[in-house]
Image (spheres, rainbow, N blue to C red):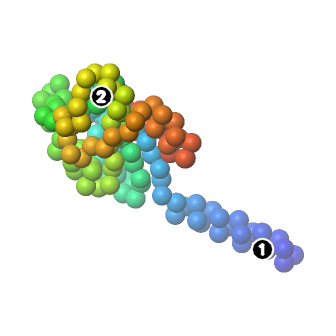
Amino acid sequence: MRFKSFLLALALSCFACAGWAQDLVVYHIDNAVAQGLKGLRNLRNHMDADPEAKIIVVTHAEGVDMLMEGAKAPDGTEFAPLVSALRARGVRFEICEITLKNRGLKKDQFIQEADFTPSGVVRLAKLQQQGYAYIKP
């Protein structure tokens, strides 16, 4: 009987600890025109609902365009202030260096809030292996 009580207490404590775990999420952006504003809006809403979430945004292909200096959405909205506000809340933005090489872009063309990763798709795979939930807005 004591053993069953111990197992029950152990199970309950495991469930309680799971509730305290920080959510890990990776957002995948590969098209700034189609995903830029929608993705940033999703990110803001995500942080509003779960401010403790650890979120990384991985961009590659045309998705890196939203992190370029002076970049704007089709409606004229500037991306940089929205990215900056999310970065201040702990969201990390990463740019694929393979995309830079393939498109002839330089790191100094991008906003300061952006970091770089050697390969966007490899980064996405590694984060998912580490338990990050995958979201593509």
Is residue 64 left or right of 18 when viewed as pictured?
A: left
Residue 135: assigned label: none
Residue at left 43%, top 42%? 26
Instruction: Please identify the residue farthest to the right as the structure is shown.
Output: 1
User: How many residues crowd mark 1 within 10 Å: few (<14), some (14–19), many (20+)?
Assistant: few
At numbered mark 2, what does the secondary structure look like: helix, strand or loop?
helix
Query: From this viewpoint, is residue 77 visible?
Result: no
Residue 100: assigned label: 2
- Number of marks present in the image shown: 2
Q: Quadrant of the C terminus?
A: top left
Q: In front of the other: label 2 or label 1?
A: 2
Q: Horizontal and vertical percent for residue 4?
A: 83, 71
Q: Quadrant of the N terminus?
A: bottom right
Q: Which residue is mark 1?
A: 6
Query: From this viewpoint, is residue 119 visible?
Result: yes
Is residue 51 left or right of 19 when viewed as pictured?
A: left
Residue at left 71%, top 69%? 10
Residue at left 45%, top 45%? 25
Nearer the N terminus, badge 2 or badge 1?
1
Q: Horizontal and vertical percent for residue 8?
A: 75, 69
Instruction: Please identify the residue farthest to the bottom as the structure is shown.
Output: 2
**Three-letter residue code for mark 2:** Leu
Q: For this rendering, which residue is in front, 24 or 107?
A: 107
At numbered mark 1, what does the secondary structure look like: helix, strand or loop?
helix
Q: Horizontal and vertical percent for residue 85?
A: 22, 50
**Three-letter residue code for mark 1:** Phe
User: How many residues crowd mark 2 within 10 Å: few (<14), some (14–19), many (20+)?
Assistant: some
Q: For this rendering, which residue is in front, 81 or 123?
A: 123
Q: Horizontal and vertical percent for residue 71?
A: 16, 32
Residue at left 29%, top 55%? 89
